[in-house]
Image (cartoon, helix red, strand yellow):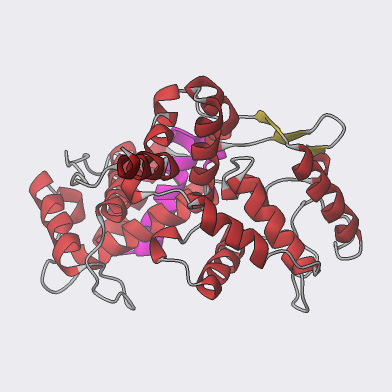
Amino acid sequence: MLVPLANWHNPTKRRLEAVRAAHERNESGLLELLRAYLVLKGRKRATLSARTLENYQLAVRDFLAWAWSDTQSLDILKAEADDLDRYIADLQTQGGHLTGSDGQVLKPGSIATYVAGVRALYRALEWAGAARLPQVRSPQDPTPPEERRPALPQGLYQKLLSHLAGGEPQTYRDRLAVRLMAEAGLRISEVVNLWVEDVHLEERLLLIRSGKGGKQRSVPLSRSMVQELEGWLKLRLAHAAAGERALLINLGGRKASGQTMTDKTLRKILNRHYRTLGFPERYYGAHMLRHTAGTRFYKTSRDLHATARLLGHTNINTSAIYAKMDLEGLFEVVDKLEDA
């Protein structure tokens, strides 16, 4: 659990510490303030995911690197909307500002994440009484969402499953992780946070204890998925560390062998398989697999309510994108034109 530091609980000390951190260009102090604000006052509060915090901290570090550079030397406590607009323009034309950044121009989605992190910093400074939140908008991405985040075509998905058809423990685990996302519709954070006791094989259900926004839901499983889980649970017994509750575990000779996986580790594993198979880069990543599940749910049911329920969406409009991701259906239309 994320725990805010005590320095930020007292309103008077909070303002003094915030102003001091800004004037002394103390990056770690401002990151502490950001974390305290998000945990105590943010929309998700103590249920804030570690990944979201990591993304926001990266954004703030990049903004501070830009604001405190020799070319800017910006007093962040007096920043106006125009200043943040200049920062966004710099991201669009020059890329990131941290050491090691390759200067590659950022995509609108990445810029939106950076802007969200900077907004969170200024909400924290406003909470501390040290600055006000400048009004700024992220640039709009002209590419439709279904093109930015495509589902994996059925042919490539079958190729991935065939690649992971071996009986080795690592291969079995990786195939299970892929199927949980691409067929059961789980997010990668939900996969790595599954415990053994969340698997209810007799009921053919998975219990997601803490989905996006801290929501809990039950996910129905296909019969073949139940068989896959049964096989993994038997294999897992020989490799899990004593007392480990995580369903998916690290395997190998490293220190963390037999212990829970991180989403970062699983992302690296998935991308390694994609590279081995020569997949186009637009199909890299983990969330693409969840989009694959959403597309299949909608194509099979033609029911947005069922699709939303399976994916854990509160609003069916969120699920409507999967009606547009069905490339297989579009190919059918195109092929029929040749027979017309």
Query: Does 122 sit left or right of 51 as displayed?
Result: left
State the residue in front, 134 or 316.
Answer: 316
Residue drawn 28% across the image and 48% down it = 112
Whole-percent x and y of residue 56?
A: 39, 52
Q: Can residue 124 be seen in this view?
A: no
120 relative to 256, above or below = above
- Main SS, magenta region, reads helix
Residues shaded magenta: 24-49
Residue drawn 48% across the image and 36% down it = 40
Q: Is 10 within the magenta?
A: no
Whole-percent x and y of residue 250?
A: 73, 66
Residue that extends furthest to the left in the rendered view of this protein: 82
State the residue in front, 226 or 234.
Answer: 226
Q: Can residue 156 be seen in this view?
A: yes
Location of residue 256 by image quarter: bottom right
Residue that extends furthest to the front in the rendered view of this protein: 339
| Quadrant where the C terminus is found in the figure | top left
Query: Does 142 sit left or right of 227 as displayed?
Result: left
119 relative to 244, above or below = above
State the residue in front, 36 or 84.
Answer: 84
Numbered label tally: 0
Query: Does 250 sit left or right of 12 as displayed?
Result: right
Residue drawn 44% across the image and 44% down it = 328
Residue drawn 32% across the image and 57% down it = 60
Whole-percent x and y of residue 244?
A: 83, 55
